[in-house]
Image (tube, grey):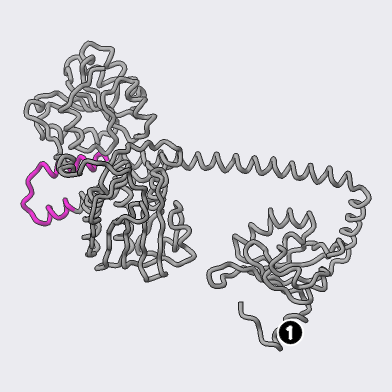
Amino acid sequence: MERPHLTDERLYDRAACGLLLTDENGLICRCNQTFCGWVGLPENELVGKRRIQDMFTMGGKVFHQTHLLPLLQMQGSVAEVQIDIRHADKSVLPTLINIFRRKEGDRIVDELAVFIATDRRAYERELLHARRHAEASLLALEETQKALQENRDELGRANAELARADRQKDEFLATLAHELRNPLAPLRNVLEIFKLKPLDDPQLLRARAVFERQMQQMSHLVDDLMDISRITQGRVELRRERINIAELMRQAAEASQALIDAGAHRLYMTLPDHPLLVDADPTRLTQIMTNLLNNAAKYTPEGGSIWFDAAEENGQAAVRVRDSGIGIAAYHLANVFTMFSQLEPALARSQGGLGIGLALVKGLVTLHGGTIDVFSEGVGCGSEFVLRLPLAAKILHTLAGSAQNAASTPQSVSPADKAKRILVVDDNRDAADLLGMALTMQGFSVTQYYDGSSALSAGPAFQPDVVILDIGLPGMDGYTVARHIRSQPWGEQTLLIAATGWGQQRDMEATTAAGFDAHMVKPLDFTELGEVINKGRTPH
């Protein structure tokens, strides 16, 4: 803060009220002579050495912590707050305080105007109260200790309530993700049916491509919601293997290409000049880089540029995603990876969002023992995200042919399998009917039911080779239906596939315990479904 001219400085020092400037933690940065005289301390014993709240009486300190500070943080100012200040000689000074919070460069400061309270009765009551405390110091100490204990108890209850609310948030996210999967399932089935039918109309082909891209985007959003819930509950297990960063960069670029193309962006990818090996979960690491690329594409105006490169730096693999996008203000950088944080009001932005993708990136990077940083010169100057992971210990054999060996093609359903009888059970009639239609078009013999009892009644006559069974059935749930199937002669060798919106580890363990052979999360991936059917039952 610039110091005023000499005349202005005299006016400042001789003002009829105490004037102070503090940082956001209350540390006094400047004060006038009026205030110094009131509290009996020179300026050099206040500036940079005392916090304003430390000069309050005990009651003032409690009021500052429980009322004044939250109010200031919420609305940016407080007016006419009555607080008693302790003089250097231990006497009490009743005051009225006005506070205004503002930004000064990169920091937050508070401007205070302090007045002597004119309420004489309140002043006399405070003096009497102080005398009584002085005359009964032991009682005051006991009462203070009691008040402190009550505050601790209250804080404990508040913390417990916050923890409960946090758990409810996690459960809400998991439930929301599950509920969003239900309408996605029939939509995915419709898409599969469209793909099985030849289309000659270019407009229909384009519409189908748009449908597929949006379906993938919705599925990714739901998956991110579920992953955030798993991370916050400590239920994510990494399946680490030694992997070359370059291979994962290619996969991430391919996964983000549709979104990049939709924005007419240019992607400049520079692979490292030598293998960068890390011990990581390849699926999760690809997910991290894909989310960073998607974020760059989303917040870069049409026709922008995105740079994607990796290199070895100080024994680490450093992966950078830089864009020419909207940039980030300096005071928002600290909140970029916080879930639900909004850098700008949602209605004021061309792209909405809950901040799930970057919060997920932060959580997954932390699980890998790495770091993620964000840099920006400000609004309109683009952004850069830098992912750093420890390099794996050097190995002697080369990586020749590893990429080729890792490549795989989706497994299709073999002709021999197409004679199989498949029973589909789902209370979502649209999902069941469309899944049955898609499987029938591939040559399977399919029938579908919408509750567990009907499916069990049809089992002996239909003799299914495969049962695709929803878990959340009304009345008799999927676990119970699976146990009944396994207890019947016709169901002992039937391939049981759980189709559900729940995909956490405990859910997979529950389906295995009920007798299922496979656990698939809605909306079903038809390539994966074909692989499961081709593989058949694994003897238990």
Q: Is residue 133 left or right of residue 302?
A: right
Q: Residue furthest front?
A: 396
Q: Is residue 283 left or right of residue 150?
A: left
Q: Main secondary structure of the magenta part?
A: helix
Pick the quarter of the image with the N terminus.
bottom right
Residue labelled with disc 1 = 11
Image coordinates for residue 296, horizontal then vertical, percent: 32, 60
- Amino acid type shown at disc 1: Leu
Bounds of the magenta span? 185-209
**Which residue is at 35% across, 51% downward?**
316
Image coordinates for residue 114, horizontal then vertical, percent: 75, 70
SS type, badge 1:
helix
Pick the quarter of the image with the C terminus.
top left
Give the total number of marks visible in the rendering: 1
Image coordinates for residue 310, horizontal then vertical, percent: 29, 56
Quarter residue 243 falls in: top left
| Residue 407 in view | yes
Quarter residue 50 falls in: bottom right
| Residue 214 in view | no
**Which residue is at 39% across, 37% downward?**
236
Vertical side of 385 occupied by 465: above or below: above
Q: Residue furthest right?
A: 135
Vertical side of 151 occupied by 422: above or below: above
Image coordinates for residue 61, horizontal then vertical, percent: 74, 56
Of 222 and 85, nearer the camera is 85
Quarter residue 235 falls in: top left
**Which residue is at 71% across, 45% downward?**
151
Judge whether residue 202 is colored magenta: yes
Of 465 and 247, nearer the camera is 247
Judge whether residue 387 is colored magenta: no
Label 1: how many residues lie within 10 Å, few (<14), some (14-19) or many (20+)?
Answer: few
